[in-house]
Amino acid sequence: MTQGNAEVVARIYGEFALREEGLVLIDPDVVIQQDPGVVGTEGTYHGHAGFVQSILDIGAVFEDMRFVPEKLTEIGDRVLATVTMTARGRESGVELRQVLGHVWTLRDGLVVRVEAYASAAEALEAVGLSE
């Protein structure tokens, strides 16, 4: 039985993909595009190493990070994720709670692209929808 795309994405959030088990769900040629509003990670990352680096870059700014998917919506080969990020500033100690939007594109059950936006509204717009 094959998994739906939303189930694949849910597994990645659950495993946070830093462990090797999570990376098996990600295409080796994945592209990660981080919006300028996503602190510490603006830019494009490539491949498994880039996927891990994007998470490490956020970790350089924040500690005690958690990404909790509140809603996963399948739209063709993409999954729109509304995600609550909680963290604490590494230097400031300030607590952060922000609702982000991620758009995951999958092919043959593997993630081939991730777009991270500073808000769920921006992610909705990226897939051609509105609130």
Image: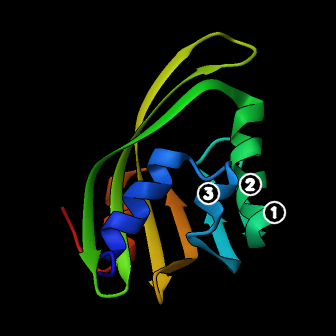
Where's the N terminus, which quadrant?
A: bottom left
State the residue at coordinates (58%, 12%): 94
Q: Which residue is mark 1?
A: 49
Q: Position of residue 76 (x, y in %)?
A: 29, 87
- Check disc 1 and give the amino acid type: Ala
Mark pair 3, 1: CA separation:
14 Å
Q: Position of residue 97 (x, y in %)?
A: 42, 27
Circle 2 Cα neighbour tier, 10 Å, few/some/many (<14 / 14–19 / ≥20): some
Q: Which residue is mark 2?
A: 52
- Check disc 2 and give the amino acid type: Val
Q: Which residue is mark 3?
A: 21
State the residue at coordinates (54%, 25%): 87
- Check disc 3 and give the amino acid type: Glu
Quick one: label 3 or label 1, which is nearer the N terminus?
3
Q: In the image as oriented, which residue stretches furthest toward the front?
A: 1
Q: Nearer the viewer, residue 93 or 59?
A: 59
